[in-house]
């Protein structure tokens, strides 16, 4: 059970700096470098790299626009940021040296870096932000009255449905965080096991699989967040009408 | 809670990760999405404007081609009119010139005829004078031995009178 948590590298006051937090900082560093490189070299006449970036951004924007036409501007930054952050965090977890370079403590290797998404703290934080942002957006878009009517009603049947909705909202947080954590953690375990059996060439297919899993999980988390945001930002009556159609 | 503890959930770490993600959202929104989306929007507008202008230019070209055809057609008709007018004028002028030339030639012929007549008369006169002189000389030379001076003079004067007649 001890292995689920990130291993502590050092303490900074009350903050326990773990190897997963260091990996998060590495992810931040990569993202910031990319962002500043792109922002600095942004030109009206794009080069191949800029064209690629524009293509990806436009694809994500169009996808958000297709799902939620009215609230694209609000939802898109969360959708794309969740995707970029989770993707880079997942992929940095399988970089050479991550999980294998560290120091020994009580005859046990403590790696300096460990995949950020193999720590429930990271995935739970992401899921909580997703949930809070979704509900805040919902209140701002449809108004507090319409928002509350989704969960509370004088009609006993609707009240029951509302209670189920509340449970489902909590479940969303659990499913989002545990799905991502479970998939990436399991992948890391598989890689460790496979590398333990035979370290040369044998882990390559599993590494390729992990690259795909990292991409898919990033896409699943971000798309689910986007869909939840789009659904909760649609007025209750309108949503009901859409469903009945 | 025990389950969360078993999974190593640390509230401080959780908050740190959440703050970290919020910072990333802010940075990406400010420095990546905003400039790229603005650029894409601007480019889209430019492309739309360009397409509209191209469409307009195409329409203008079509219009100008129609106008060009109309102008060419008009010019062709005008040119044909000018050519036919010129031909007509040329025929008229040629006739006038011909008539004038004929009149002039006739006048020249008449002048030449008159001049020939005059010179003929003059020549005749000169010839008469010359012939008289020759006759007088001949008479004088042939009558020298036969007649006296007085008779000679009378004969000559008589001859001269005859000649003059």
Image (cartoon, coloured by chain):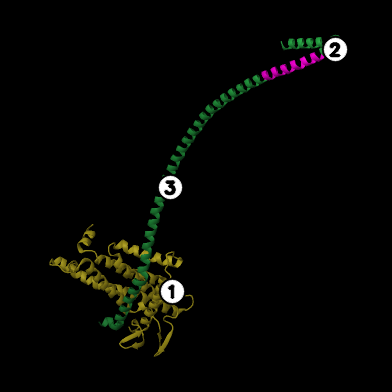
Q: Which chain is green?
A: B
Disc nearest the viewer among 2 and 3: 2
Q: In this view, does B73 lie to the left or right of B132?
A: left
Percent position (x, y) of residue A142? 21, 66
Query: Is residue A75 positioned above or below B48 on the image?
Result: below
Residue of label 1: A207
Residue B155: in sight, yes or no? yes
Query: Which one is nearer the viewer's eye here, A163 or A79?
Result: A79
Mark 3: give few (<14), some (14-19) or many (20+) Cα within 10 Å: few
Region in magenta: B116-138
In magenta segment, residue B165: no
Q: Which chain carries label 1?
A: A
Q: Determine whether the residue tagged by mark 2 lies in a helix, strand or loop.
A: loop
Percent position (x, y) of residue A89? 38, 76
For the point 79% across and 14% down, which residue is it?
A: B136
Whichever of callouts 2 and 3 sits on the residue coming sooner in the sequence is 3
Percent position (x, y) of residue A112? 40, 84
State the predominant SS element of the stretch in magenta: helix
Q: Is residue B101 left or right of residue A244?
A: right
Query: Which one is nearer the viewer's eye here, B62 or B19?
Result: B62
**Residue B144: which numbered mark, if any?**
2
Q: Determine whether the residue tagged by mark 1 lies in a helix, strand or loop.
A: helix
Q: Which chain is yellow?
A: A
Disc nearest the viewer among 3 and 1: 3
Q: Quadrant of the C terminus of chain A?
A: bottom left
Query: Is residue B21 positioned above or below A157 on the image?
Result: below
């Amino acid at each position: 059970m001890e292995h689920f948590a990130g291993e502590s590298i050092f303490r900074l006051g009350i903050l326990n700096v773990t190897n997963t937090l260091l990996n998060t900082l590495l992810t931040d560093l990569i993202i910031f470098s990319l962002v500043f490189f792109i922002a600095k070299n942004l030109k009206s006449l794009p080069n191949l790299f800029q064209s690629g970036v524009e293509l990806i951004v436009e694809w994500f924007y169009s996808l958000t626009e297709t799902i939620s036409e009215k609230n694209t501007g609000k939802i898109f930054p969360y959708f794309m940021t969740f995707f970029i952050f989770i993707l880079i965090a997942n992929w940095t977890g399988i970089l050479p040296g991550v999980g294998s370079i560290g120091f020994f403590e009580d005859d046990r290797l403590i790696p300096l870096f460990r995949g950020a998404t193999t720590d429930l703290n990271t995935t739970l934080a992401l899921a909580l932000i997703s949930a809070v942002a979704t509900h805040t957006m919902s209140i701002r878009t449809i108004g507090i009255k319409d928002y509350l009517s989704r969960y509370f009603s004088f009609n006993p049947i609707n009240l029951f449905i509302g209670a189920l909705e509340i449970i489902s909202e909590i479940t969303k947080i659990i499913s989002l965080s545990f799905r991502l954590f479970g998939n990436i953690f399991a992948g890391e375990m598989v890689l460790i096991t496979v590398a333990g059996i035979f370290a040369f060439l044998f882990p390559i297919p599993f590494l390729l699989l992990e690259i795909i899993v990292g991409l898919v999980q990033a896409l699943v988390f971000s798309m689910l967040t986007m869909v939840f945001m789009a659904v909760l930002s649609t007025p209750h009556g309108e949503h009901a009408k859409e469903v009945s159609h | 809670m025990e389950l969360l503890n078993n999974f190593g959930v640390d509230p401080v770490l959780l908050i740190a990760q959440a703050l970290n993600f919020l910072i990333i959202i802010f940075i990406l929104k400010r420095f990546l999405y905003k400039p790229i989306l603005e650029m894409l929007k601007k480019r889209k507008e430019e492309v739309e404007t360009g397409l509209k202008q191209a469409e307009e230019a195409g329409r203008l070209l079509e219009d100008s081609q129609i106008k060009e055809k109309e102008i060419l057609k008009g010019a062709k008709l005008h040119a044909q009119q000018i050519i036919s007018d010129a031909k007509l004028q040329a025929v008229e002028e040629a006739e006038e010139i011909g008539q004038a030339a004929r009149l002039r030639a006739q006048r020249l012929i008449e002048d030449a005829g008159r001049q020939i007549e005059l010179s003929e008369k003059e020549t005749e006169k000169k010839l008469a004078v010359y012939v008289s002189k020759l006759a007088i000389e001949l008479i004088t030379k042939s009558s020298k031995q036969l007649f006296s001076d007085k008779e000679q003079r009378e004969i000559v004067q008589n001859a001269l009178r005859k000649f003059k007649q």
